[in-house]
Image (spheres, helix red, strand yellow):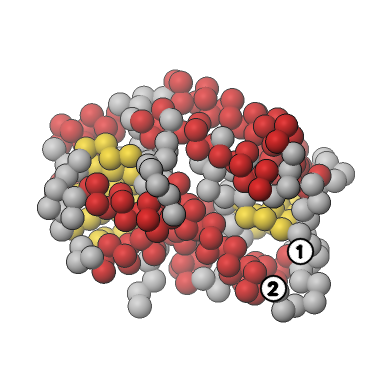
């Protein structure tokens, strides 16, 4: 396989037609046979891959180049998620603005060339796949929670967490979901998995869901300041951070297995947990 075919596989699995702004082929390669994949794959990992004779390095998080410069475009897709959930467009746009501005400022000062230029100097194929694999994660979490709670009368937040923990990737991780706002004993109510939007939507997006009648929001991770802000809100519901590395693995592991089915040797590292069949 080549890097374009590998990216196409990820897009197909996620149901996307084009490469999103937070993903990219940064140094293309052909005749790929063995792959090193991880959450954060930068210069040290590229040197390791070169030393161990890997044909390709795949990062999950955007390492630079267009995947970092265009990251804000993916954050904006959270507006569509909110609208699909019944939130008014003008409220959705206002809710994401604080997070979007922070992303823009962080991107503007970042060294977007650091890892990309290193890959080219090392002459090692290098790519990252972010949103497509996060979409797989969101889909699997949604299916797991629905399956685990739909037959329970008045399910609690704890029932949803138990359902998520049935996923094998979650069992392999060292962190479990944490209820940062609300309580695991609270009623689950109307819920949503607020993921696959570049990063979490912060307190603003969470409150947009709560004010729209949602009782529980699942994020992959949450900042301290956002948690403090939400705890001050009388209308805040339950906010659960599912655990970053294990949650990312929920989306990445199926892709790793698909690559292996194509005949590639794939070695996970740097936070990617792949269950052994």
Q: Position of residue 246 (x, y in %)?
A: 48, 59
Q: Position of residue 201 (x, y in %)?
A: 63, 40
Q: Give the quadrant of the C terminus.
A: bottom left
Q: Residue at x 79, y 47 (%)?
A: 212
- Is the C-beta separation of discs 2 and 1 under 8 Å? yes
Residue furthest right as drawn: 234
Asked if residue 10 lies left or right of residue 232, the reply is left
Q: Which residue is mark 2?
A: 149
Q: Residue at x 54, y 43 (%)?
A: 197
Classify 170 as above or below 182: below
Q: Which residue is mark 1?
A: 188
The answer to whether one can see residue 139 in this image is yes
Q: CA distance from mark 2 to mark 1?
A: 9 Å
Q: Residue at x 33, y 30 (%)?
A: 65
Q: Nearer the viewer, residue 34 or 28?
A: 28
Q: Give the quadrant of the N terminus.
A: bottom left
Classify 127 as above or below 101: below
């Amino acid at each position: 396989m080549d890097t374009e075919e590998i990216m196409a596989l990820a897009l197909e699995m996620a149901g996307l037609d084009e490469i999103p702004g937070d993903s990219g082929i940064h140094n293309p390669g052909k005749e790929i046979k063995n792959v090193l994949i991880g959450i954060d794959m930068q210069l040290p990992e590229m040197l390791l891959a070169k030393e161990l004779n890997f044909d390709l390095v795949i990062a999950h998080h955007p390492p630079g180049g267009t995947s970092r410069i265009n990251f804000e475009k993916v954050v904006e897709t959270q507006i569509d998620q909110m609208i699909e959930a019944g939130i008014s467009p003008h409220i959705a746009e206002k809710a994401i603005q604080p997070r979007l501005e922070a992303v823009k400022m962080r991107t503007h000062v970042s060294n977007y060339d650091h890892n990309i230029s290193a890959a080219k100097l090392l002459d090692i194929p290098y790519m990252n796949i972010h949103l497509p694999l996060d979409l797989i994660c969101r889909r699997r979490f949604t299916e797991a929670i629905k399956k685990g709670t739909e037959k329970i009368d008045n399910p609690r937040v704890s029932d949803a967490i138990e359902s998520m923990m049935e996923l094998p990737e979650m069992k392999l991780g060292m962190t479990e979901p944490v209820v940062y706002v609300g309580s695991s004993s609270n009623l689950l109510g109307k819920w949503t998995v607020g993921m696959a939007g570049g990063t979490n939507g912060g307190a603003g997006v969470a409150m947009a869901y709560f004010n729209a009648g949602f009782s529980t929001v699942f994020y992959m991770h949450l900042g301290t300041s956002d948690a403090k802000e939400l705890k001050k809100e009388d209308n805040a519901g339950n906010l659960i951070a599912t655990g970053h590395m294990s949650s990312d693995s929920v989306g990445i592991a199926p892709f790793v297995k698909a690559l292996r089915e194509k005949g590639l040797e794939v070695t996970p590292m740097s936070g990617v947990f792949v269950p052994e069949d």
